Amino acid sequence: MSTATTWAKSDRQRERERLRRRDARRSGAVATASTVGVFGLAVWALVSSPGWPRVRETFFSWSEFAGSFGDVLSGFWVNVQIFLIAEPIILVVGLAVALARGVRTPAFFPLRALAVAYTDVFRGIPTILLVYLVGFGVPALNLSGAPSSPLALGVIALVLSYGAYVAEVFRAGIASVHPSQLAAARSLGLSRPQALRYVVLPQAIRTVVPPLLNDFASLQKDTALVAVLGVIEALRQAQIHSALTFNYTPYLAAALLFVLLTVPLARFTDWLAARAERRRAPGDR
């Protein structure tokens, strides 16, 4: 004969949970009060400054905002397209360069040296300068088949710049995988490429997702740099409206659109980082 027992929390466990809920409510209340206080103080300092009436007129004009928002929004779609085109190419370039830097076979030394030179050079050149060099230098070469569209040239410049940064992120992720993982995979009969593909890279990519998303948040903002090549995107549209009305509110509209796109990605990055932290310490809930 079996006796069924029903599990129930102990009094100590219920008391512990009650204290945790109380601490959570207290922390939330303190955080809310301090946030409201800080933002309230910042707003008060802004609106009480001597130049606030002039700033409100030139940066916060509702009529200018409403009049320019449609054009700025259409230009912002160009920024989104640039981002969507450049991002997958950057991932491929970055991963290829990172793998090339890990090749130790003497016969492939030129490939490794080329990968090192690529990351060193393109990380050292400011992105806006690279946009100028590619955007105006490539067409001047008159190469057959070379792209001449400012949009394509801008994407190439962004890929060259961010590919170098992403390559270093991938390389750090690969280096973070313990060498015993690779040795164990080789001992099971996998070739080195198979060990990289099935054992090392999955772990490395999972580790570097948060820093990669940070790089792509920066890429979203730097898509505005192609405006120097004449591409009519959000920043250029804002410049056009500001030049016509001598009012800077269209810039505020463009900034708002970039923020609306970047903030969700930043929160997603934080969530991924928190999840990775929980996985490293599963007992600490």
Image (cartoon, rainbow, N blue to C red):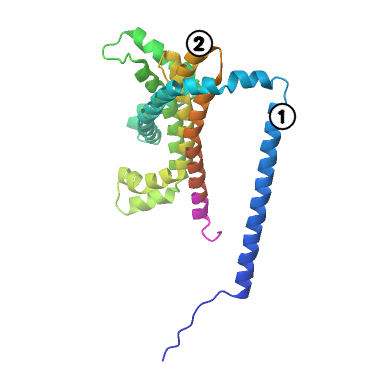
Residue 89, given in percent of the width and then of the height, sits at: 35, 30
**Closer to the observer: label 2 or label 1?**
2
Q: Which residue is mark 1?
A: 45
| Image side of residue 55 versus residue 168, left or right | right
| Image side of residue 23 versus residue 102, left or right | right
Q: Is residue 80 magenta?
A: no
Q: Nearer the viewer, residue 205 or 112?
A: 205
Which type of secondary structure does the marked residue at label 2 adopt?
A: helix
- Residue 232's image quarter? top left
Q: Nearer the viewer, residue 68 or 6?
A: 68
| Segment tinted magenta in the rendering | 275-285
Which type of secondary structure does the marked residue at label 1 adopt?
A: helix
Residue 125, given in percent of the width and then of the height, sits at: 49, 20
- Return the mark for residue 244: 2
- Residue 248's image quarter? top right
Q: Is residue 175 visible?
A: no
Q: Quadrant of the C terminus?
A: bottom right
Q: Is residue 281 magenta?
A: yes
Q: Nearer the viewer, residue 113 or 241?
A: 241
- Which residue in the rendered view is the most extreme toward the left? 145
Report, in whole angstroms, how far the alpha carbon at label 2 lies from the one at label 1.
31 Å
**Residue drawn at point x = 49 percent, y = 33 percent:** 260
User: Disc 1 residue type?
Assistant: Ala
- Which residue in the rendered view is the most extreme toward the front? 63
Q: Nearer the viewer, residue 80 or 71?
A: 71
